[in-house]
Image (tube, rainbow, N blue to C red):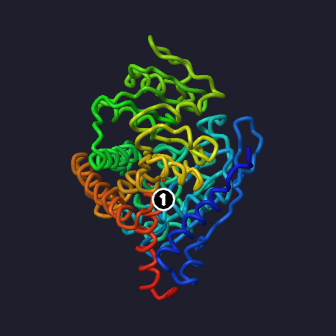
Amino acid sequence: MSSKPNPFAIAQQQLDDAAAILGLSPAMHAFLRVPMREYHFSIPVQMDDGSYQVFQGFRVQYNDARGPAKGGIRFHPDETIDTVRALAAWMTWKTAVVDIPLGGGKGGVICSPKNMSREELERLSRGYMRRLAHLIGPEKDVPAPDVNTTPEIMAWMLDEYETITGRHLPGVITGKPVPLFGSLGRSDATARGGIYTVREAAKMLGIELEGAPVAIQGFGNVGGWAGILCHQMGMKVIAVSDETGGLYNPHGLNIPALAKHVQQHPKRWIEGYTEPGAERIPKEEGGKVLELPVTVLFPAALENVITQENADRIQAKIVAELANGPTTPEADRVLYEKGIYVIPDFLCNAGGVTVSYFEQVQNAYNFYWPAEEVVKRLDERMTTAFHAVHEMAQRRKVHNRLAAYLVAVQRVAEAVALRGWVK
Ligand code: GLU
């Protein structure tokens, strides 16, 4: 096995391919290849036993030519600055592909949230915001939830920000709980947006989704909601996995029961769930969920899970990337050659940031929309973005990820050029 791919090197390589086709000037290409700004923090936190730990945190504002930087904050033991850079670059392309007036950013803290108490997490979240507060704002940079960060964490961060600045400014952070100025429809927005792109892809490919088998790798917030929405649409979720292993039931898992189990599990895991007809896939073989003969495969966890090593064994008709960066460039080529329809991450999972944008709009007006309005507007954005990418792929005869880059990079480069930063 080769060493773990560096996500930022991958993000740069993907941009390089798009830059060559678009004929970007060398200066524009060089500018879009790196973040505009990045911050490194040390965050001291008192732990429950009275000792102190110093955590390392980051915030990368990759590009704000099209609007304030926008993107989530991850709490993860394997976080690195290069992962945050890559994710911030992908946010830049994501906001551009759905054409919302925002740039791209990302934050991260190296920590093991599953081994921390709620109180320790609160102190860490507030400590991170103390470092960040003067660097962000609704007109500068707007964080949100991501891997292992929740609406509750957004509420603590909002409160810390407002305490520091002495005013109410809910648009500084999105993905907040609804009673604290969050938007209806934000919690399932990433999965819902992804499902809309799958619906459009199935139409283009002439595939019937009713009763179609589905596999979901990752069963956290995004994967869990994908399961529920697929189930509601009459699709058959035959396999799911998380870091504790997987579950397989060829007749379709009882998703409402599984979702309830996960919600009640102290670590939100599928471990310990049983149902008649379901087989347990051991932890070491969790990757098998990716290789089943399904209509739709949703990678919904972390980066680099579809690689050169397993791409050949993927049997799905559609790979809908709810995770950020799940497929390496080598694997992309294999999937394209096999005729698998990939809905690339920054298109497929753009529903979350789209509803974050709606949340900010509602915060700015201090006037809140009903859920139906959020869902309708989300559908419009996702459907339009899907077809822009699909048509680009057909016209340029390239795979969908490259097509998504062509659409997005062109928009960002145009804004950069119009500002006169680089020609
Ligand atoms: N973390 C999500 C993403 O990767 C949402 C970001 C946001 O809402 O700003 O798209």
Q: Let me know if residue 131 appears in the view.
A: yes
Percent coordinates x, y for residue 143 in the rendering? 49, 58
Q: Check disc 1 and give the amino acid type.
A: Glu
Percent coordinates x, y for residue 210 in the rendering? 27, 32
Q: Nearer the viewer, residue 269 or 215?
A: 215
Measuring 77% from the left and 41% from the top, which residue is drawn there? 51
Measuring 37% from the left and 52% from the top, which residue is drawn there? 351
Query: Quarter of the image containing the N terminus?
Result: top right
Q: Let me know if residue 175 appears in the view.
A: no
Q: Nearer the viewer, residue 422 or 72?
A: 422
Q: Residue furthest top?
A: 276
Residue 242, placed above or below residue 164: above
Numbered-mark total: 1
In the rendered image, which residue does mark 1 sit on? 162
Left or right: 326 as drawn, with respect to 83:
left
Percent coordinates x, y for residue 88 in the rendering? 55, 62
- The quadrant where residue 85 appears: bottom right
Measuring 59% from the left and 36% from the top, which residue is drawn there? 118
Q: Nearer the viewer, residue 230 or 50?
A: 230
Percent coordinates x, y for residue 238 in the rendering? 43, 26
Measuring 54% from the left and 28% from the top, which residue is drawn there? 269
Residue 243, placed above or below residue 104: above
Query: Which secondary structure, mark 1?
Result: helix
Residue 169, placed above or below residue 20: above
Left or right: 52 as drawn, with respect to 403:
right
